[in-house]
Amino acid sequence: MTETTHRLVLKDLNNTRATKFSVVPSADTLKEIRDRLGIDDLRKLRFEGELRPDGTQDWVLEGHLGVTVVQACVVTGDPVTTRLEEDVTRHFLANPPDLPHGDEIEMPEDDTIEDLPETLDLLDIVYEVTAIALPPYPRSEGAELEQRLFSPPGAEPLTDAAASPFAGLAALKDQFSKDED
């Protein structure tokens, strides 16, 4: 499958056998995905698999996404390269189960179920899977966040240890130990 055929019109597919796909985006498309994700670089992207009929109206997509991403280290800002390898499964249903609506809803047990689209854009799946798989806090090897303390003049800086809910108990224990001596 070439770059121009990453969109699959489901009614045009053979509904008696699987349709194999392989998406290897062009440099321009990689740049678009990279910019949309807000990362430094994206390369060696390949999304391969098959879309097969499931009954008379539904479809199942199973594939594998491999992509190399480059993000800035959260500590140093240096580039951090990560290889992502993700298996992908989606069930496109003509009549999906009703999902609750509202401000707060629970995730359904099966998060692979989606409404059946007329046209399936495989690049949308590439974007979604990559966005979810990205390391949230990439770090260069050996990079450590140094502790900085700030406080108003004359006040003792609040450290992570002092902010702990157990810090008060430790201070109380120390006071009892001094009282016993």
Image (cartoon, rainbow, N blue to C red):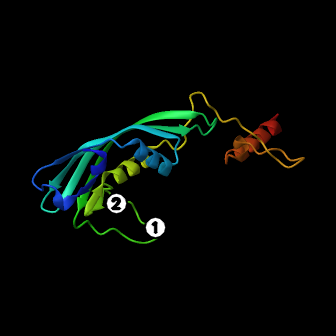
Rendered location of residue 101, percent (x, y): 39, 71
**Res. 150 image quadrant:** top right
Rendered location of residue 50, percent (x, y): 21, 46
Name the image quarter holding the C terminus: top right
Rendered location of residue 161, percent (x, y): 70, 41
Rendered location of residue 82, percent (x, y): 46, 34
Which element is circle 1 on?
Answer: loop
Residue named by callout 1: 104
Label 2 neighbourhood size at 10 Å, few (<14), some (14-19), many (20+)? few
Please give the name of the residue rendered at 52% of the width and 44% of the height, measured from the top-left corner. 39
Asked whether, in this view, residue 148 is left or right of residue 93, the answer is right
**Res. 110 image quadrant:** bottom left
Asked whether, in this view, residue 68 is left or right of residue 143, the answer is left
The residue type indicated by label 2 comes to: Pro
Asked whether, in this view, residue 96 is left or right of residue 175, the answer is left
Which element is circle 2 on?
Answer: loop
**Res. 53 image quadrant:** bottom left
